[in-house]
Image (cartoon, helix red, strand yellow):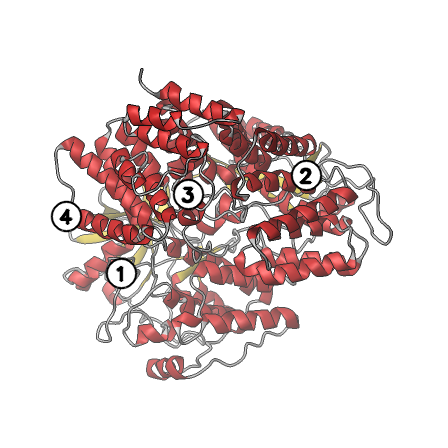
Amino acid sequence: MVKPELSGLPTAPDAPEVISAASEGVLRVGQIVAGRYEVTARLGAGGMGAVWRVHDRSLDEDVALKVILPDRVGDPAALARFRDEVKIARKITHPNVCRVFDLGESETLTFLTMELVEGSTLRHLLAAELLSPARALDMLQQIVDGVAAAHERGVVHRDLKPENVLVRRDGRCLVADFGLAREPGIGAVTTAAGAVGTPAYMSPEQLKGEKLDIRSDVFALGIVGYELLTGRSPFGQGSPGTISTAILRSEPPPLEVPGLAEPVLQGLREVLSRALAKDPDGRFASAGELGAALARARDATQARSTLRGLSEPEPDTSRAPAAFQWWKLALVPPLLFVSLFLLAQFPRGDIRHWRPFSGDDEEPEPQTPPGASASPSDADERATLVVLPFENLTGDAAWNGLSLSAPEVVRTGLRTMPEVRLSEVTPADRDAAIAAGVAFWVRGSVQRVGGTLRLSAQLDPVGDEKEALPGEPVEVDAEGSDVTRPLETLRSRVLDEARLVVRHWGKRRRAMLGTTNEAAKKSLLDYYKMVGPGPRKEHFSEGLRLLDRAIAADPAFVPALVERAHLRSMGAGEGTQASRMADANAGIEQALATRPQDPMALVTRCRLMQVALEVGGDKPTDASIERAKAACDAALGVAPALADVYLSLARLQDRACHDEEAMLSLERVLELDRSLSGRVLKYSVSLALANDRMLVAEKKSEALIAFHEEERRLGARSIARRAGIPPEQMGVYFRRGVVLLRASRLDEAERAFEREITDVEALAGSAWAEAAAIRGLLRVGKARGKAVLPEHRRRLAEIEAEMRAKAASDPSVAKTMVGAYLWVDPEAAVEWLGRLSARGSCEDAIWRGLVYRAAGKTKLAREALAACSATEQWEKRCVSRIESLLPR
């Protein structure tokens, strides 16, 4: 941590007071604090604490130690802020957030330890020079990414300013000082008499002492961004009162940045104008949304930093709850029916966040209709990668062998990617690599960080490709002398990055090679630039316009035809669901007529046929299931390593009650694409529970929690978010709770259910999931012979009363509640089942048999299954499967 002292700088009209005498005597160089930390230097001080550089004797590394000043030790509010800084900051782990390690006390001292940042504050940097536009934008993106990680946890920083941003010597920015930060339930409401922060960076609502949320930080980020680009505050100089008045009443002058292209400048004006809106409702909803808009504005001419991940917009939670939509679909057989337990988090008819294939092997020259153009037959759509020798930065020649073996381990992983051509020749420099057609290279090192050995790797585009997506830095620490596991982790994580960046590269490459019509090409590239990793609802209208324009310019432009079919199947454009799906299928057939072996078109056809079985309304037949499987097999013929196809196959196998095959397909998905781990692991847990495979359920639920925590920790940098897949927000801890409950691990189950309740409370349309978690707590309480909290019972009664009222006119609501309760409280599921009238179909009979079986009502289960007049083999197989699980 670095916190140099300063005041009166040009862009710091309200810089904190410099404290010298009071803090000088707190510690002295050479002093040992808490028997562990040796003081080596004083770094600076603020209004509440002084910061020192200390050597941690236990870990043999330097850290920063922040001590509360003696005159504040007796102040309960200051102590509370100090403790809150540790409590909140420890929840946020992100490369652009300064890490806080621990809180301690020694004699009369209260202190916290944190990451030592070698560098300066952003304030000192702004005072020293006017940053270039490219550097300013890169730094702003990093700062926004760090704040986005806090917003992911519901934390409002409340004191964002250049003094609280640290800049390492390598250029990485870290957001620090969460002493004023708050999260829900921790003093989130300020009053006019008690508003805290720095007035020059306060939002209007913060200045007025009104209730704050994360949009207040968005306003402060707008001010910081304006300063980074112009070197001055958007609200002028002067006293705090003058600046506060300007924030409340005046609009900032238009952004002017010499050297920026006008389209980029106009985009940045729009971004900052929205961030600085007086009304919170007019701003971006979070730093993540601001980051996404900033990335789009920069994209026209600015290369992206390799030090940060892409800030992705928040997932769309405005639509009706997925559970309610899913239950409008046809009833499903027992193993597909586990989506009831999934809490319908991934509606089977929803391919909103599926990414079309980006291309892999060479393909034969297509038959080109008159007036159209196609890819050259000799064009190889694979990306060429080269792995450079790793540097040994340890200073110890004993590690030379590891620096030689690490790149070969990485090459072994990359050789499993069909869409990659691995170059075995190491180019002398960047120019030689470009001349050899290398698209990406992997550079790495072996180094010592304190007492830990670290393997580092970075995958970057070789050329000056402004649209290329750089890989995130991969850093793996080795404990002890055994490097086997760290090397395997390095291989896996570099492979993750390679799949992500090559998919992005391949998509654009196919657009460039897919037509010679420049207008068509530009429209598709504009579409890709707009949607980023994947299209969302807000892209529907403009996306269709761009794709239609591309196809009008070249009717045989296969990548545009496929993207349009994908977008239509998601719900874009006019018409009913059936008409949109028909239009999507027609587009795919047109693409395949042009290029019969096009990977993107074949994969999309597989997905469309699988989805059609869920949303078509007609009873699935053995023949229709087999046709969909054949389409997926055809896709695997040209794209053998694409995870999305195996996911579709798993759903088809599940529907046909080939449960073992479905589980194997899901395993294949996990091997091929870790970004899909959230939804696949949720699905796997449910399949295992439906089949009483408790060891599998235990393993998969544990892996699900680990992946979920990693995604939360990384935020916008996470592998799934960067791939365009929204985080799985509901049902993660609930599944773990169900598994633990069945294993009679009651304390752990209780914590899991409580965590689920905490997670879903703020999500729109999540009441049914909250009710299911409370039902889990009731089961835990019953097993212990103890009552649950009265507020939980009251909340459950409220939810169920609301759902009963809705179910009176909408049967899908009752089906939602059956699904929510099926595995955690089957008796309650049966009660809701009684609110539905039997439809008489075989699927309905199978569904009821599954519910009764879970509730231990064997007689009713057999009676329900006997009502099935099975005509298809999959129906007979599903009935037989449930019967085999019933006690004899």
Q: Given the current orientation, which residue lies at the most extreme right position? A: 370
Camera-side mark, 4 or 1: 4
Whether pointer 3 and pointer 2 mark residues with C-beta atoms closer than 8 Å, the reply is no
Label 4 belongs to which residue? 790
Mark number displayed over residue 49: 1
> Label 4, label 1: how many angstroms apart (C-alpha)?
42 Å
Q: Residue at 50% of width from left, 41% of height from top?
A: 348
Relative depth, front residue between 538 and 386 = 538
> Label 2, label 1: how many angstroms apart (C-alpha)?
62 Å
Q: Residue at 30% of width from left, 65% of height from top?
A: 46
Image quarter of the C terminus: top left
Whether pointer 4 and pointer 1 mark residues with C-beta atoms closer than 8 Å, the reply is no
Relative depth, front residue between 393 and 248 = 248
462 left or right of 243 in image: right
> Label 1, label 3: how many angstroms apart (C-alpha)?
49 Å
Whether pointer 3 and pointer 4 mark residues with C-beta atoms closer than 8 Å, the reply is no
Residue type of the residue flagged with mark 2? Leu
Percent from the top left, x then y, of residue 870?
Answer: 48, 26
Mark number displayed over residue 344: 3
Q: Earlier in the sequence, mark 3 or mark 2?
A: 3
459 left or right of 772 in image: right
Whether pointer 1 and pointer 3 mark residues with C-beta atoms closer than 8 Å, the reply is no
Percent from the top left, x then y, of residue 206?
Answer: 32, 72
Mark number displayed over residue 602: 2
